Amino acid sequence: MEFVNRIHLERKLKEKKFQEHKLTIIGIIESFKVSKVTTSKEIIEIYQLRWRVDYVSPNCYVFDITNKIRMILFIDLENRTFIFYGVFTHDEYDTLNIKKIAKNNSNTNKDKLKDNKDKLKTHENKTKQRREGQKGKH
C-alpha cells in the first residue's frame, strides 16, 4: 500500500504531546505499507486487537492509540493507498466534525496521490535539467 502525506506525519510527531507515542504511530503506518488487507472488516479485525478502531465512513478510520490520543487515516483499499489525516488528543478530536472531514476527504485520496506523483515527476525533471545544464559547464 502506498503512503501519502509523509510531511504532515513528520510535523505532527515533532509535537511534544505526541513524542511518547511516535513509535506506535509509525508502527501502524509501516504495517499498512506492507498490509495485504482487502476489506474494511479485515482492517478492524487486525488492528482492533491492539487499538480500538472506528470505521467512520468508507475510507475513514479512527485509531485510539491510547485513551488520550487518536489518529485518523484514510484508507483507499481499491487503489492500495492511505493518507495520514492527523493525530489528536481526545479534546482536539471532540472539536472536529469527523463526519464532515470523512465526507470531504473520501474522494480526495486519488487526487492527492496524483498530485504527489506529479510533484515528484516535476522535481525529478528539474533535477535532470539541472544536471544536464552542469554537464555543459565543465
Image: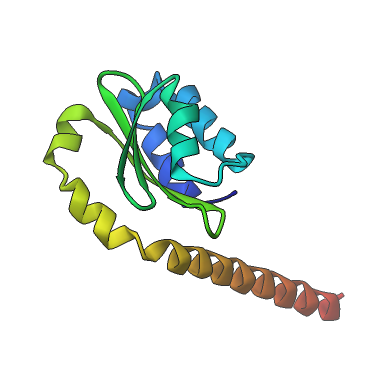
Residue at 50% across, 28% down: 46
Quarter where residue 11 is shown: top left
Quarter where residue 25 is shown: top left
Q: Judge whether 35 appears above or below 79 on screen.
A: above
Q: Nearer the viewer, residue 100 or 14?
A: 100
Residue 105 visible somewhere in the drawing: yes
Is 50 left or right of 95, judged from the image as shown?
Answer: right
Q: Nearer the viewer, residue 54 or 126?
A: 54
Q: Where is residue 23 in the image (x, y as percent from the top left)?
A: 50, 23
Q: Quadrant of the C terminus?
A: bottom right
Q: Position of residue 29 (x, y in %)?
A: 51, 37
The residue sitting at the left extreme is 95
Q: Nearer the viewer, residue 114 or 34?
A: 34
Q: Judge whether 40 appears above or below 112 on screen.
A: above
Q: Where is residue 56 in the image (x, y as percent from the top left)?
A: 28, 44
Is 55 left or right of 135, judged from the image as shown?
Answer: left
The residue sitting at the right extreme is 138
Residue at 60% across, 66% down: 120
Is 22 left or right of 94, judged from the image as shown?
Answer: right
Q: Position of residue 85 (x, y in %)?
A: 36, 47
Q: Judge whether 138 appears above or below 97 on screen.
A: below
Residue 4 visible somewhere in the drawing: no
Q: How many marks?
A: 0
Q: Judge whether 24 appears above or below 54 on screen.
A: above
